Amino acid sequence: MLESYFPILVMGVFAAAVAGGMCLLARLVGPRHATAQKAEPYECGMWPVGDARRRFAVKFHVVAMLFILFDVELAFFYPWAVLFRDLRLFGLIEMGIFTAILVAAYAYVWRAGGFEWD
Amino acid sequence: MNPVLLAIIKAAVVVFFNLNLVALMVYLERKLVGRIQHRVGPNRAGPFGLLQPMADIVKLILKEDVTPRGADRWIYGLAPILAATLAFIGYAPIPFGPPGWQVADINVGLLYMLMISSLTVYGVMLGGWASNSKYSLLGALRSSAQMISYELGLAGAVVAVVMVSGTLDLRSIVDDFQAQGGLGWLPGWNIASPLLWPSFIVFSICAYAELNRVPFDLPEAEGELGAGFHTEYSSGRFAMFFMAEYAGLATMSALAVTLYFGGWSGLGWFDLDRLPAWLGWYSTIAPTVIFFTKQMVFMVGAIWVRATLPRMRYDQLMNLGWKVLIPVATANLVALALFEAASQRWF
């Protein structure tokens, strides 16, 4: 069972070796003339104001929360979809109820303005 | 042959092949976009500019690798490697030929593909955050929000294929086409079923958004954000992000071919057994040639789209993802289930 995943591990090692190797090669071959100005983060050529470790818009947090919510709900569709033909009417009704709840939640979030992006 | 050795050889060949495919795609993209815009495109390095990707990679490696002040060194260095690695291992469960022509024959290949496409957010997010640049941070935030939003549409659209095929195994999904046979000359690919058309359309739109391709390339909106999450990256590390993008495109195209366009199965017009004996070797590689031809059609299609469409605004993008694609994908599932139930007389 688990041995069918072994080639993925091998592939990951190869890919990481290629990627890491190229980064390393670039570090070894490329020039290195570090200056204070060069190391400044890009900010339109001005001196940067403060650093980038700061608070960001809460909208992104809302998107992340909604994503987790709906992604978990979507994950429940997969086992049902695989057994769709075997479960027949039972599965259909069960999933119909589940989908109805999902649609209700979706409608609520829409009404509450969770999808608005201004 | 020893299975361990076989796995190593297959993985090496596929990674090597994809590396070359990335180089080819970089060239093809510049050339095609050039021609579409009435330019010539690269034509200096080698015949027809074919050596341009080689020149590019050598140039990138010879550039100075700058780490910005205040960057988180470890994460900053790790993010591009993570991005490239994930982009390449996504190809593992794709069946690009008859049994055996696949790196990892796992029985949940489709879930694996979705998992990898979710994980690619990490390369973008970590890279953007660790750079300690405001452009990078904003680019990474936008990019992660976009990718996770379209992830939902993608996952929802793919459920329709699972319902039709009744399996998560990519090889079985392709074998399913073979069994169906199709309407006479038309191959029995999943795309032949009209109930899967909405699923395919949602899938393609979400795939473009997942890959940050035009018209959804907001993470790299040059006019607003510099270069988005990889503003601060240079040299080899930038090359890795660049490579990851094209390898991701290859993987997504291969997934689209596998799910909707019959994978390695041909059109059924020509029986390969009728080939003369001296062409017998061709019937061995024919399915793989067919697969990559289909994959190339999708990849060139992505280039065509890039040369044609303008970039969307961010609120339009979020509206499309949350208010259009997710309902369409869900409605498609409901329609498919009801149609199946009615035609099988379950009630």
Image (spheres, rainbow, N blue to C red):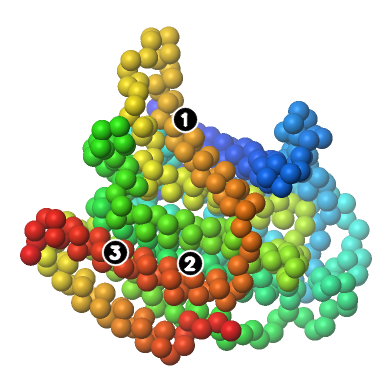
Task: Give the quarter of the image for residue B100.
Answer: top left
Measured as percent of width and height from the top left, residue B311 is found at 63, 64
The residue that label 2 is drawn on is: B150
User: Image check: B253 left or right of A44?
Assistant: left
Give the alpha-carbon distance from disc 3 to disc 2, as whole Å.
17 Å
Pointer 2 indicates a residue of which chain?
A: B
> Looking at the image, is B272 positioned above or below residue B162?
above
Earlier along the polypeptide chain: callout 1 or callout 2? 2
> Looking at the image, is B104 positioned above or below residue B222?
above
Measured as percent of width and height from the top left, residue B314 is found at 60, 73
Q: Is residue A110 among what the camera can see?
A: yes
Give the alpha-carbon distance from disc 3 to disc 1, as whole Å.
33 Å
Q: Nearer the viewer, residue B326 or B93?
A: B326
- Of helix, strand and loop, which one carries label 2? helix
Could you tell me if the residues under marks 3 and 2 are in contact, i.e. CB atoms within 8 Å? no
The residue that label 3 is drawn on is: B333
Which amino acid lies under the numbered mark 2 shown in the image of this protein?
Tyr
Give the position of the C terminus of chain A as an image quadrant.
bottom right
